[in-house]
Amino acid sequence: MTKKADDSTKISDTIRIVSDELEHEIIIFEPGFSAWMVSFARPRDYYSQQFLEARNRVYVTEWNQRVLQPNRYNSMWYEQEINYRPNVDYGYEVNYQLYYYFVYFQRTYNQQLAAFPVRI
């Protein structure tokens, strides 16, 4: 995650997720993700922030392991490590959209980033 202070915006299939209070940002470049979010994501506050953080920690850990193994995992899918620190409160919105990106990614590309099943 990089630091930036702006509001969340959507440009085409690029999603910008920003936490104003902590100045953290995620940018997702993924065709189809915006439409998928509108169609499938649960309403905000369906899951607690603690649930989202716990899932994101597992998903980020596995994602980053795959980035470091380009001979074993498709480097087109796992291009860049995600800097997600477990001791930082990124806020609800960042965790919500990051979680749903992982759900989208796993379902779209038939990947499994954890031992537990993906939950929409």
Image (cartoon, rainbow, N blue to C red):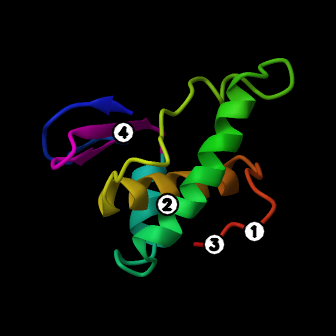
Disc on res. 26: 4
Q: Secondary structure at mark 4?
A: strand
- At which x and y percent is residue 105? 61, 49
Residue type (three-letter) at the residue carrying disc 3: Arg
Residue 116: x percent and y percent? Answer: 77, 67
Q: Does the magenta run of residues contain 20? A: yes
- Residue 80, quarter of picture: top right
- Residue in the foreground of this view, choosing between 25 and 89: 89
Quadrant containing the C terminus is: bottom right
Q: Residue furthest top?
A: 71
Q: Give the residue number, with chain letter if any, for mark 1.
A: 117
C-alpha separation, residue under disc 3 versus residue under disc 4? 21 Å
Circle 3 or circle 2, nearest the eye: 2
Sequence-wise, the earlier of marks 3 and 4 is 4
Name which residue type carries label 4.
Answer: Ile
Confirm or deny contact between disc 2 and disc 4 (CB under 8 A).
no
Answer yes or no: is residue 104 visible.
no
Write the residue at 48% across / 33% down: 83
Asked whether the beta carbons under mark 3 and mark 1 sit within 8 Å of each other, the answer is: yes
Magenta part of the chain: 15-31
Q: Residue placed at 41% from the left, 57% from the top?
A: 95
Q: Amino acid at mark 1?
A: Pro
Distance from disc 1 to disc 4, alpha carbons, whole Å, reads 24 Å
- Pinpoint residue 84: horizontal percent, then vertical percent: 48, 40
Viewer-side label of 2, 1? 2
Considering the image in quadrants, where does the N terminus appear? top left
Which residue is labeled 2 in the image? 53
In the picture of the structure, the residue carrying the numbered disc 3 is 119
User: For the residues marked 3 and 2, what is the alpha-carbon distance in whole angstroms?
Assistant: 14 Å
Neighbor class of circle 4 (other Cα within 10 Å; few <14, some 14-19, many 20+) is many
